Amino acid sequence: MKSKPVFLVVFLIGICRASFVQGGDGGFTMARLKYGGGGNWYWGYSAVPNMLTFLKENTNVKVNEKIVTVSPTDKDFFSYPFLFLTGHGYMRFTEEEVARLRIHLTSGGFLFANDSYGLINDFKREMKRVFPDKDLVELPFTHGIYNCYWKFSNGLPKIHKHDGKPPQAFGIFHEERLIVFFVYESDIGDGWEDPQVYNDPPEKREAALKMGTNIIIWSLLN
């Protein structure tokens, strides 16, 4: 998986989506989205720190490595354009959270949701509440998110076995912009974890971190 010209990507990031700079010059921030319903939204303690370190070391994107957790009702919720959601099902948003999520995502925000196993049904139901007139659609391997930095000709990497199905990526679009990216049967979030957590081989962890980089770069450019 070879990189595209880094200077071009970094230049575009510099002129696009300036709102992704948190707190002045703080840099790109990944905010973990907290949700109700009893699901483990906090899953994967080392995942986000490792992803941010990889992004910092392999791109010229300025990175805020502070660990941030946010709920849709928090006062500073709209200050975090990139939201990361993961877990194992049992998720539920309140009506107020649904409304604020809709505003956030249709006003420039981006949600990356990682199914760490068992999340898909709850996630689909809640996204239908957020966007009653929109559907999660499967993205083709030709979508730009697969080649905006590193090239993934066959789509998402398969990190964990789960039910043994091929990995799939689904998206929700608003005015032709991808605002929700949901990965199923891939679990790249677990691939971000420390090596000893799942004993994934180095090549799988690298693929997960590279795909994570693509997701972040795509969100910055679009």
Image (cartoon, rainbow, N blue to C red):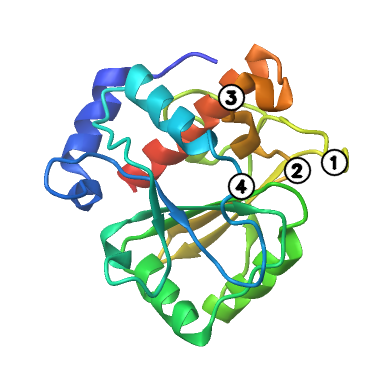
Q: Position of residue 169 (x, y in %)?
A: 64, 47
Q: Which mark is residue 194?
A: 3
Task: Say which residue label 4 marks.
Answer: 43
Give the distance between the C-alpha atoms of the residues marked 4 and 1, in whole angstroms: 22 Å
* 4 and 2 marks in contact (CB < 8 Å): no
> Closest to the observer: 89 or 109?
89
> Closest to the observer: 14 or 144?
14
Name which residue type carries label 1: Lys
Crowd band around label 3 with a 10 angstrom C-alpha radius: few (<14), some (14–19), many (20+): some
Quadrant location of the N terminus?
top right
Give the distance between the C-alpha atoms of the residues marked 4 and 3, in whole angstroms: 13 Å
Query: Image quadrant of residue 101?
Result: bottom left
Query: Image quadrant of residue 88?
Result: bottom right
* 4 and 3 marks in contact (CB < 8 Å): no
Identify the secondary structure beneath mark 1.
loop
Which residue is the extreme one toward the right?
A: 163
Identify the secondary structure beneath mark 4.
loop
* 2 and 1 marks in contact (CB < 8 Å): yes
> Closest to the observer: 89 or 16?
89
Q: Is residue 221 left or right of residue 101?
A: left
- Tally of marks: 4
Q: Which mark is residue 185?
A: 2
Identify the secondary structure beneath mark 2.
loop
Q: Earlier in the sequence, mark 4 or mark 3?
A: 4
Residue 118 visible (yes or no): yes
Identify the secondary structure beneath mark 3.
loop
Task: Say which residue label 1 marks.
Answer: 165
Q: Is residue 174 left or right of residue 155?
A: left
Give the distance between the C-alpha atoms of the residues marked 3 and 1, in whole angstroms: 24 Å
Q: Position of residue 178 (x, y in %)?
A: 46, 55
